[in-house]
Amino acid sequence: MDQRGQDKILRRILHTLRLERSRHRQFEPGPFDQINPYDYLVDVLQRVGEHPASKVAELTPRHWKMHFADQPLRSALHTRPVA
């Protein structure tokens, strides 16, 4: 996947995050209330280049929690123990 494709997927994910966050904040706790935002963003930024565009919805917080939260990808800078 080229840089343009990665940028397009990342923009789509960020747009979806903004929509979900604003929608859920008005009515109920959102997906970010149940996951660590740092772990989520580090994981998604590492996956976005290789993740199939047809499955980009899996990278939104709600679906990410079901698919990847148990074993998130870590940054080389990560020093905190996994809870």
Image (cartoon, helix red, strand yellow):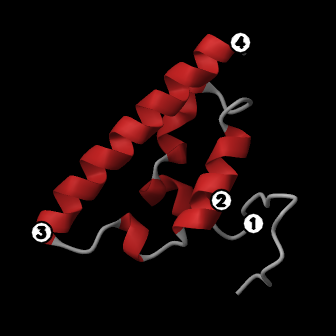
The residue sitting at 83% across, 76% down in the picture is 79
- Which residue matches tag 3? 27
The image quarter in which residue 83 lies: bottom right
Residue that badge 2 annotates? 68
Indicate the secondary structure of the residue bearing disc 1. Answer: loop
Residue 66 appears in the rendering: no
- Of the residues under marks 1 and 3, which one precedes in the sequence? 3
Label 2 SS: loop
Task: Give the amino acid type for the residue marked by disc 3 in the picture.
Answer: Phe
Residue 2 disc label: 4
Identity of the residue furthest to the front in this view: 77
Outermost residue on the right side: it is 76
| Residue on which disc 1 sits | 71
Q: Secondary structure at mark 4?
A: loop
Mark 1 burial class by Cα count in 10 Å: few <14, some 14-19, many 20+? few
Q: Is residue 65 visible?
A: yes
Q: Position of residue 45 (x, y in %)?
A: 66, 43
Mark earlier in primary sequence (3, 2)? 3
Amino acid type at mark 2: Phe
Q: Residues within 10 Å of mark 3 (few under 14, many from 20)?
A: few
Q: Who's the residue at 63% across and 47% down the image?
A: 44
* Quarter of the view holding residue 54: top right
Percent position of residue 27, x then y: 12, 69
Q: Residue at x 53, y 27 (%)?
A: 9
Q: Nearer the viewer, residue 14 or 31?
A: 14
